[in-house]
Amino acid sequence: MSHIDTSHIHYSWMPHIRQALEDNLPRIEREIGAEFLPPAEDVFAALSMPLEDVRVLIVGQDPYPTPGHAMGLSFSTRSGVPAPRSLKNIYAELGDDLGIPGRADGDLRAWFEQGVLLLNRVLTVAPGQAGSHRRLGWEAITEAAIRALAGRDIVAILWGRDAQACQAFLPGTECITSPHPSPLSARRGFFGSHPFSRANAALEARGVPAVDWRL
């Protein structure tokens, strides 16, 4: 059995997710075994951010399945890992939207450190098998976390149908939606959607400081 490290979850999340963890984590650990990504200590990296610090939520699907890439934050890779294709498209839109150049690697911790919660719906994956840990219980845990953000002065950026389904958990929350930035769908409406400037405008309208999206 795997032993996923929950010690990095900030205490502010626990009243909201404790029941979902108790109900689902034992089964998840039984099902996924010892071989999974990201490393056990990084699985809950996104929830190390205090709940009250969240300004923007960006929902991803599941971790990168390539060993050495996933680090517990949606769309982000470890420092020095070249940006995957979806992230290259995010960088392209960032440049078109705000004139901010992307970078060679995929490390998005500069966003996370400003209150951009980079949360995947599914928090683990089998090496080399994208989507392999869906419907094992992760969705219940991350739904509970997302519901904890409803009604707060945040903005949610939801790319693709899976992420957009989370609107149901966020009543009263400003949601910016578009197709997913993957190469298969980016040209169907992701490019030109201006999510970064729109998120900042929505934050400032609520009296919340804008995010500096530079990396």
Image (cartoon, rainbow, N blue to C red):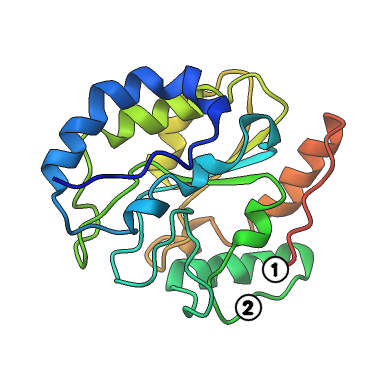
Mark closest to the chain's N terminus, 1 or 2: 2
Q: Name above or below for residue 177 compared with residue 130.
A: above
Q: Is residue 75 left or right of residue 68?
A: right
Other-residue count near label 2 (Cα within 10 Å), few / some / many at <14 / 14–19 / ≥20: some
Residue 159 horizontal/vertical position (percent): 49, 48
Residue drawn where x is 63% and y is 25% of the image? 173
Left or right: 8 as drawn, with respect to 102: left
- Residue 158 visible in image: no
Q: CA distance from mark 1 to mark 2?
A: 7 Å
Q: Secondary structure at mark 1?
A: loop
Q: Describe the element under mark 2 as helix, strand or loop.
A: loop
Q: Quadrant of the N terminus?
A: top left
Residue 8 percent across, percent down from the top left: 48, 42
Camera-side residue: 39 or 93?
39
Q: Amino acid at mark 1?
A: Leu
Above or below, comparing residue 182 to residue 122 in the picture = below
Does the residue at mark 1 contact the one at mark 2 (Cβ under 8 Å)? yes
User: Mark 2 is on which residue type?
Assistant: Arg
- Which of 131 and 126 lies nearest the eye of the viewer? 126
Residue 103 is labelled as 2
- Name the quarter where the C terminus is drawn: bottom right
Q: For this rendering, which residue is in front, 17 or 139? A: 17
Q: List the residue tagged with mark 1.
A: 215
Image x and y of residue 189, in percent: 53, 55
Image x and y of residue 151, in percent:
64, 19
Write the residue at 16% across / 32% down. Answer: 27
Indicate which disc residue 29 carries.
Answer: none
Label 1 Cα crowd, 10 Å radius (few <14 / some 14-19 / many 20+)? some
Q: Quadrant of residue 10?
A: top right
- Say left or right for 10 vs 182: right
